């Protein structure tokens, strides 16, 4: 064979050895399987706690908002320190430890609940401990994606992660309700125990990428400050976090908390009927995530996801005006399509513009902004709903979110320039 032929053959072998899909990378595959079960549990938890409070204990939507607030309050205190630990500790060991702790919390809740709905105090304590362990595991899970995937595979991995989130929206609440219908409210928690156990086993074969930050002698407070300073001094990333805050404070509480109460209070359905709505929203996220994964590195990502946010806030405003259940279902699907663009592109832009040695801290802040603000939004929306009705509260907050996103879309120069 000629030298040219040998060279071409070698290049062909090298190209064929390079993965074209993130799932072809074994460590990421283990992480993704774990993420599927983790998101199933996390998204089912909000639904199950709300279901138990509204239908099992016959409490009001403000009490439902309080439980979601307690579930999310540990995020405020633990996500930033957990981000520092994600930069300093072995990520695989950290993930497995938090998974085992979550399994214990779910199992104890199911045992104490017995055959009934338990009590409000039990739900509050369970929500608090569930919030603690999920807070500790969230930053390291997000920071592992860019650590395991490089180049064009990063957006493939983020899209697959969004699909894992999608599966949880489609199946999390639906399967939890099914087990609750079959075996009682405690059966729903036993299902979450099983999911957490499966996710823990998926992590065992994963090869750890090691610790990104070496020689870091800063105190915990100093390390957190450095991460916050980095985000603040980068105008594009700061703008991405501002829009993330709009989603976490206004849009997420509506979708996962207030709409459940709206379906029961103003549409005359069971609170459990929020599960199919969440499922359809998940289908929408899957559609846009698959599109992004197939198209690869899209141009003008920030412009595209801001347009998607504008569409999402309009959908939410209309959800507050709905008078029939089927209308919510149609809007949920559309909202999911918009949400898929936001989830993929916002996170991808932040991760691709963050140094590896700071990824855990930035992802801790990402989780804090996206999820840590949700309990405050849920609590405020619960109180607002009691005063002016769930539909009016949803539409009012959606209009506020639309105004903020529109202002960023028209005047946000820094966010348009980020790549």
Image (cartoon, helix red, strand yellow):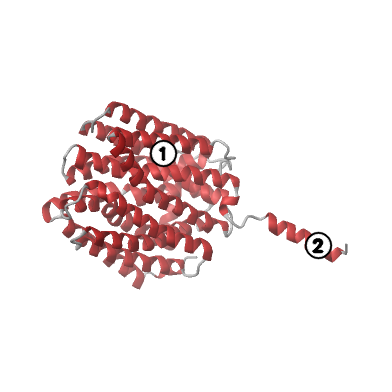
Residue 345 in sight here: no
Percent across and percent down for residue 186 are 30, 32
Residue placed furthest toward the bottom: 410
Asked if residue 77 is positioned above or below residue 413 in the image, the reply reads: above
Percent across and percent down for residue 79 are 39, 43
Query: Label 2, on which residue?
Result: 7
Q: Quadrant of the N terminus?
A: bottom right
Q: Helix or strand or loop: what does disc 1 sit on?
A: helix
Q: Residue at x 37, y 63 (%)?
A: 338
Q: Nearer the viewer, mark 1 or mark 2?
A: 2
Q: Residue at x 52, y 66 (%)?
A: 295
Taking depth in this image into account, of 395 and 113 the one nearest to the observer is 113
Taking depth in this image into account, of 197 and 91 the one nearest to the observer is 197
**What's the CA distance linking mark 1 and mark 2?**
49 Å
Q: What mark, if any, has residue 136 been given in the picture?
A: 1
Percent across and percent down for residue 162 are 44, 54
Percent across and percent down for residue 279 are 35, 53
Q: In the image, 198: left or right of 382?
A: right
Taking depth in this image into account, of 199 and 283 the one nearest to the observer is 283
Q: Quadrant of residue 322?
A: bottom left
Taking depth in this image into account, of 326 and 9 the one nearest to the observer is 326
Q: Helix or strand or loop: what does disc 2 sit on?
A: helix
Label 1: few (<14), some (14–19) or many (≥20) C-alpha neighbours in 10 Å = many
Q: Residue at x 16, y 49 (%)?
A: 383
Label 2: few (<14), some (14–19) or many (≥20) C-alpha neighbours in 10 Å = few
Q: In the image, 411: left or right of 323?
A: right
């Amino acid at each position: 064979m000629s030298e040219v032929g040998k060279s071409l053959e070698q290049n062909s072998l090298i190209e064929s050895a390079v993965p074209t899909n993130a799932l072809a990378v074994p460590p990421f595959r283990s992480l993704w399987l774990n993420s599927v079960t983790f998101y199933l549990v996390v998204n089912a938890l909000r639904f199950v706690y709300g279901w138990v409070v509204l239908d099992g204990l016959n409490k009001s939507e403000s009490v439902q908002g309080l439980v979601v607030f307690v579930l999310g309050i540990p995020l405020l205190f633990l996500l930033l320190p957990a981000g520092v630990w994600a930069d300093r500790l072995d990520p695989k060991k950290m993930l497995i430890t938090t998974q085992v702790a979550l399994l214990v919390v779910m199992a104890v809740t199911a045992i104490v609940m017995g055959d009934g709905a338990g009590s409000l105090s039990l739900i509050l304590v369970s929500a608090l401990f569930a919030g603690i362990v999920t807070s500790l595991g969230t930053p390291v899970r997000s920071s592992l994606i860019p650590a395991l995937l490089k180049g064009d595979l990063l957006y493939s991995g983020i899209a697959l992660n969004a699909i894992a989130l999608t599966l949880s929206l489609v199946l999390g609440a639906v399967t939890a309700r099914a087990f609750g219908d079959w075996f009682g409210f405690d059966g729903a928690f036993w299902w979450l125990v099983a999911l957490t156990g499966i996710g823990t086993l998926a992590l065992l074969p994963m090869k750890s990428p090691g610790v990104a930050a070496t020689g870091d002698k800063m105190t915990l407070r100093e390390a957190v400050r450095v991460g916050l300073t980095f985000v603040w001094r980068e105008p594009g990333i700061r703008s991405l976090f501002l829009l993330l805050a709009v989603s976490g404070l206004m849009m997420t509480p509506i979708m996962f908390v207030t709409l459940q109460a709206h379906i029961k209070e103003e549409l005359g359905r069971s609170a459990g009927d929020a599960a199919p709505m969440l499922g359809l929203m998940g289908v929408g996220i899957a559609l846009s995530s698959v599109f992004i994964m197939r198209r690869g590195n899209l141009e003008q990502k920030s412009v595209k996801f801001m347009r998607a946010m504008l569409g999402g806030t309009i959908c939410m405003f209309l959800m507050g005006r709905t008078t029939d259940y089927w209308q919510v279902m149609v809007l949920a699907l559309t909202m999911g399509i918009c949400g898929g663009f936001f989830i993929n592109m916002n996170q991808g832009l932040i991760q691709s513009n963050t140094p590896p040695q700071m990824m855990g801290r930035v992802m801790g802040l990402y989780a804090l902004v996206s999820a840590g603000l949700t309990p405050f939004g849920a609590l405020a929306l619960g109180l607002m709903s009691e005063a002016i009705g769930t539909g009016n509260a949803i539409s009012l907050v959606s209009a506020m979110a639309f105004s903020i996103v529109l202002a960023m879309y028209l005047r946000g120069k820094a966010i348009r320039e980020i790549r």
